[in-house]
Image (cartoon, helix red, strand yellow):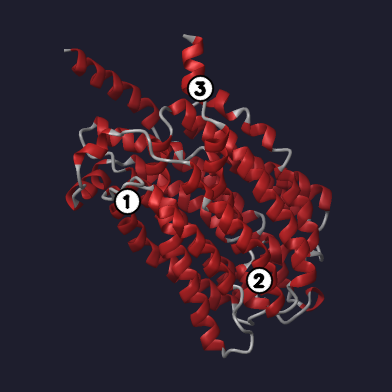
Amino acid sequence: MATKKQKTDKIGIAKFWGWQSRAVSLGSMTVIYGYLMIYCTNTLMLSPELVGTLLLVSKLFDGVTDLFAGYLIDNTHTRFGKARPYEFAIIGVWLCTWLLFSCPAQWSYAVKAVWVFIIYSFVNSILATLLNTNQTTYIVRAFPNMSQIMKVNSYGGIVVTLCCAIVSMSFPTLMGTMATSGAGWSKLVGIYALPLALIGILRFVLVKETVPVDADSEGKIKAKEVVAVLKNNKFIYIVAAMSILYNITLGMNASSYYFTYIVGDISKYMLIASLSMPMLLVMFVFPVMMKKIPISRIVMLGCVCGAAGYLLNFAAGSNIVLLMIAGALYGLGGLPIAYISGMLILDCAEYNALKGMARAEGTMTAFSSFGSKLGQGIGSALLGVLLGAAAFDGNLAADAQAESALIMIRSLYSIIPAIMFMLIFITLYFYKLDKVLPKLRAEKAAEGNS
C-alpha cells in the first residue's frame, strides 16, 4: 500500500518545475507592476490621482473579461486540452509590460495617460485574465489527486517565492541606478521581460492535460448553468471578498514611496525583499498543517500575523531592523493567501458538483480573479487618490514634501494594510465549506452504495 501511494504521489521533476515556471513569470510581473505608480508619477509626471483612477477603471473593465474568460475556458475543447492553450498569453504579457514601461516621456500628458490605460488594460483585462482563469481548470487535469495538487501548491510555492524574491531584491537595486529616465526604465524592464517570457512558456511545453474530469464529458456549459453556480454557491463570494481585500493591500504597494521618501534609499528595500527567502521553510509546513487544520483557518492565522507586522511598520519609521521584523511578520502572514488559498476554489467547484451543478472551475476561478483585480484596482486608486489628497508632489525631494504627504505614505505602508488583514480574518470566519463538504461527500457515497 505504501509503495502504491508513493507512486501515486510522485510528480516528476520536469512536470513539477514546468508547472512552477509560469507562476514564477507571472509572480515576477506582479513585483514589477508594484513600481508602476512611481514610474508614472516620477518619470511620466502624471498626477497620482489620475493614475489611480485609470488603474481602477481598468480593473472594473476586468470584471467583464474575467467572467467571459471563465465561460470561454469552461467551453474550450482542443487537442492540447481545455486550459493549456491559453498559456501562450504569457508572451504577450511581457511584450506589453516592456511597452508600458517604454512610454516616451516627451509625449503629451494626455497621450501618456491613454498609453498607460490601454496597455495596462490589455495586459490585465485580457492576457493576465486568461492566465489566472485557466489555473484551476488546468491543475485538476494535470495532476491526478489532491495530494499532488497540495504538493504543487505548497512546495511549488517555495520555488515561486525564491525566484520572485530574486526579482524583488534585484529590481529596486537596479532601479536606483538605471531608472533615472524613461530610457532607463525601458532597459530595466527589458532585462527581465525576455527571460521571464521564455521561462513562463515552459508550463505549456512540459505539463500536459492527462487527467480526465467528469465535467469534460458534459459538453458545453450553458450561460444559465453559470448563473446557477453563482446564484447557489455563496462560498465563492467569501473567497472573492478575501481576494479583494488582500489585493487592495497589494495594489496599494507603497513600498517604493516609503523607501524613497521615509527611509531615503529605495535600494534598501532589497533587505525587506530578502526576508522571503528564509520564509521558504514555512512552505514545508503547509502540507502537514492542511491535513490537520482547514485551509481557511490557516489563512486566518496568517491574517493575525500580517496585521501585527503592518502595525509595527508605522512605529518603525526609518529603522531598518524594525522594518525587517515587520516585513517578516506580514510576509509570513501573506503566504497562506498567496499559495494555498487557491485550493478553496477547488472546494467551491467540488461543492457545485456535489450539489448537482456544473463544476465550472473556470467560472469559479474567474470570479475569484475578478475579486483580485478589483482589489488591485481599488488599492492603486487609493494609493493615487490619498497621495494626491495629502499634497504629494513627484517633482519634490523628500525634505521638500508636505508633512501630510509623508504621514500618508507611512499610513499606506502600515495602518491601512493592517485593516485589510483584519477584515480578511472577519470575512473568513463565515466560510464554513470545510464543514459542509464532508457531509456532502458522505451523502454522495451513500447514494452510490444504495
Query: Where residue 372 appears, x then y in whole percent?
Result: 46, 54
Of the numbered discs in the image, which one, if any, rests on residue 38? 2
Dots 1, 2 in contact, CB < 8 A: no
| Amino acid type assigned to the residue bearing label 3 in the image | Lys
Q: Residues within 10 Å of mark 1 (few under 14, many from 20)?
A: many
From this view, report whether residue 87 is shown above or below residue 328.
below
Of the numbered discs in the image, which one, if any, rests on residue 194? none
**Residue appearing at x 55%, y 27% in the figure:** 287
Q: How many marks?
A: 3
Whether residue 282 is visible here, answered yes or no, is yes
**Residue appearing at x 33%, y 38% in the figure:** 349
Quick check: 208 left or right of 42?
Answer: left
Q: Nearer the viewer, mark 1 or mark 3?
A: 1
| Amino acid type assigned to the residue bearing label 2 in the image | Ile
Dots 1, 3 in contact, CB < 8 A: no
Nearer-N-terminus badge (1/2): 2
Q: Residues within 10 Å of mark 2 (few under 14, many from 20)?
A: many
Quarter of image, res 330:
top right
| Amino acid type assigned to the residue bearing label 1 in the image | Ile
| SS assignment at label 3 | helix
Quick check: 264 left or right of 346?
Answer: right
Query: Where residue 152 appears, x then y in whole percent?
Result: 53, 35
From this view, report whether residue 374 is shown above or below residue 151.
below
Q: Nearer the viewer, mark 1 or mark 2?
A: 1
Q: Residues within 10 Å of mark 3 (few under 14, many from 20)?
A: few
Query: Where residue 327 appears, x then y in whole percent?
Result: 71, 47
Residue matched to label 3: 291
Quick check: 314 left or right of 442?
Answer: right
Residue matched to label 1: 73
Q: CA distance from mark 1 to mark 2?
A: 35 Å
In the foreground, 156 or 270: 156
**Residue appearing at x 68%, y 77% in the figure:** 42
